[in-house]
Image (spheres, rainbow, N blue to C red):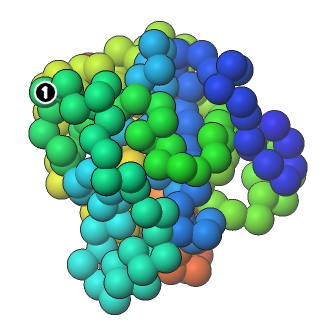
């Protein structure tokens, strides 16, 4: 990974990696935690509906989205999860035809500023990968992370929580995650609140 791209190949994945794939021509990314065995746990408004803003952005973003195959994945069809909230899917369904990238933690301030897009890295350090897997599995099994909203509680927030145990706190009319800020083009401050390990 480097200054211009966090792209990785599937063979480099380790359980506990925070991964993402760009959607809609690099307008936003869908984030999740790779848990091994070709499985990803992620947070979504609904299958293929990660946008969920309830605003004019939905029509804009969904109009140019990757078109999913009409064939149901035999691996994901066997999942017992609800099609919204915290879900598990195979890596291919998570990627939805997109390219695989790995989110970076504890980057230098210089690299953080140099990144052209929010939602690709953070200055914060991460907990060990096994802790990230534990948190993701816990939230999957307990069905918890609240209601999806691209501006205030989205898939990036979920993955960052799994990796760090920290939640983004809102201090304004919209959420503060990197991808939300990129979508709206706003500038805001991030502050985190430490939560107990689950």
Q: Along the line of sight, which residue is nearer the eye, 157 or 194?
A: 157
Residue 110 to residue 143: above or below: below
Residue shown at 47%/15% (left/top)?
Answer: 36
Q: Along the line of sight, which residue is nearer the eye, 160 or 47?
A: 47
* Image position, residue 133 (x, y; %): 41, 18
Residue shown at 63%/61% (left/top)?
Answer: 118
Q: Residue furthest bottom?
A: 56
Residue 65 to residue 6: above or below: below
* Image position, residue 80 (x, y; %): 13, 27
Mark 1 highlights which residue?
80
Q: Which image quarter is the N terminus in?
A: top right
Answer with left or right where residue 165 lies relative to residue 117: left
* Image position, residue 131 (x, y; %): 43, 14
Which secondary structure lies at badge 1?
loop
Question: Is residue 144 in view?
Answer: yes
Residue shown at 53%/68% (left/top)?
Answer: 24
* Image position, residue 170 (x, y; %): 36, 63
Question: Is residue 166 in view?
Answer: no
Answer with left or right where residue 167 lies relative to residue 111: left
Residue 172 to residue 79: above or below: below
Q: Dot 1: few (<14), some (14–19), or many (≥20) neighbours within 10 Å? A: few
Residue 116 placement: quadrant: bottom right
Residue 112 to residue 76: above or below: below
The number of numbered badges drawn on the structure is: 1
Residue 8 placement: quadrant: top right
Residue shown at 69%/63% (left/top)?
Answer: 117
Q: Which image quarter is the C terminus in?
A: top left
Q: Along the line of sight, which residue is nearer the eye, 153 or 96?
A: 96
């Amino acid at each position: 990974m480097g200054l211009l791209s966090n792209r990785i190949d599937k063979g480099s994945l380790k359980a506990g990696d925070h991964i993402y794939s760009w959607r809609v021509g690099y307008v936003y990314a869908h984030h999740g935690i790779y848990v091994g065995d070709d499985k990803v746990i992620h947070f979504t408004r609904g299958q293929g509906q990660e946008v969920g803003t309830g605003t004019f952005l939905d029509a804009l973003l969904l109009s140019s989205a990757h078109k999913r195959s009409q064939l149901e994945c035999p691996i994901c069809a066997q999942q017992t999860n609800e099609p919204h909230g915290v879900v598990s899917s195979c890596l291919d369904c998570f990627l939805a035809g997109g390219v695989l990238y790995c989110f970076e933690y504890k980057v230098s301030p210089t690299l953080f500023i140099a990144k052209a897009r929010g939602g690709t890295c953070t200055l914060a350090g991460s907990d060990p990968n096994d802790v990230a897997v534990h948190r993701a599995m816990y939230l999957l099994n307990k069905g918890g992370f609240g209601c999806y909203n691209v501006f205030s509680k989205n898939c990036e927030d979920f993955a960052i929580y799994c990796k760090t145990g920290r939640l983004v706190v809102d201090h304004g009319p919209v959420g503060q995650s990197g991808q939300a800020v990129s979508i709206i083009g706003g500038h805001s401050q991030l502050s985190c609140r430490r939560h107990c390990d689950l």
